[in-house]
Amino acid sequence: MNHFREQFPIFNTISDPFVYFDNASTTQTPITVIDAMSRYYTHDRSNVHRALYPLSLNISDRFEHARSKVQQFIGARCPQEIVFTKGTTESINLVAASLSENYFQENDEIIVSLLEHHSNIVPWQVIAKRNKLNLRYLTVSETGDLSMEELEKLISPRTKLVAVTHVSNSLGSVNPIHEIIQMVKKRNCLVLIDAAQSIAHIPIQVKELNCDFLVFSGHKMYGPTGIGVLYGKEEILREMHPYQTGGNQIRSVDVQQTIFADLPSRFEAGTPNIAGVLGLEAAVNFITSYDPAEIIQYEYELTNMLESRLSEIPFVNIIGKPKHRSSILSFTVENCHPTDVALLLGEKGICLRSGYHCNEPLMNVLSSEGIIRVSLAPYNNADEIRYFCEKLIWARNLLHRNKNDIPSKSKI
């Protein structure tokens, strides 16, 4: 993976030590993505889908080419099924707000799991309260796995939608979404998959999955921030109302009414994040230039090494042991607050996340004041894991020697 790492300028611009273990939050950016966005601002700056001069026509064509590239990347049937958003959060809010207009009836049910990021809980809570729906939660085992048996019992004749993450952002659990989708579709429910944590690590083909919606963000797959994707089946999107209204989504307007444009424009009000879309296309090209099997194997070996090393440290408690784990591993340190540990590791150039990870319902189940999360990418390596474990032991020893001098931080 040396060639992979060499594509990321940040590893040559920040002085050693620099160990970036916060990839579940945001991945680093390869030079090809940076160049694609820079070229737009320096050579191709214009708006899309509005003017007829060559610069605007050219960038409009490239914008739609990027949409087709994303379509091919996830195996959608047509470009019209790809809607560009600000990210996973907006994609879920779009679906929730639009479906709340005419899909749900009073006392209908929505099922989410306790592994969900707040972005896949709060929007459903809001529309459940507004539309007098029932929000039901699929619990999590001690290992960090979801129960298919429990899901089958939860689904009732009133269930209208199941929203579940592909990979947990806190525990790294890889959920059996093929089986979940098959079960849900047999009961004639809609299903939404949050692929934010899987899109850069696991090949996804939505036609094979048969999910109704799939959402992800560019900044977790080596792309820019502020850009994301909502995939939706064409026949379902056509029945949904626009989430926002304004320019670029209109077929015609008079003083009495508005007729909205066809897919996907009706869901893309206003000037889009053009540079972000071009950067996202470059990120897709970057990912697909590598053998996915090689990436999966390397991350698997790296994660196993991390888990093995941490298991050998007596004061470390690894949280969860799911049947299938992605490149995310969380833990606590005995008698140490997670934030204190993270702050000390940060002083040694180790970038990781501590706290609740936008996952408070799960933390309440774990009875945890927070956890420390390491999330890996193919540009990480074994030397970084060894250095991290060494400094983790140092941080814990320092906190125990000076526990009266270093105040515990409040929860994040």
Image (tube, rainbow, N blue to C red):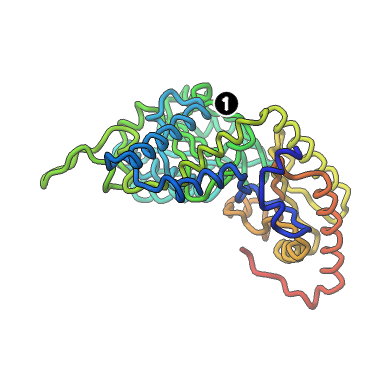
Q: Is residue 12 above or below residue 394?
A: above
Is the residue 201 above or below the residue 227 in the image?
above
Quarter occupied by the C terminus: bottom right
Residue 269, position as x, y percentages in the image? 32, 45
Residue sitting nearer the eye, 172 or 12: 12
Q: Which residue is drawn at 26% across and 48% down?
A: 246
Foreground pick, 336 / 276: 276
Q: Residue at x 71, y 45 (%)?
A: 376
Name the residue at 69% across, 44% down.
Answer: 328
Residue located beneath label 1 in the image: 178
Say whether residue 223 is left or right of residue 213. Answer: right
Circle 1 SS class: helix
Q: Can residue 117 be seen in this view?
A: yes
Amino acid at circle 1: His
**Residue reaching furthest to the left:** 255
Residue 147, image x, y percentages:
62, 34
Q: In this view of the protein, which residue sits in the foreground, 190 or 229?
A: 229
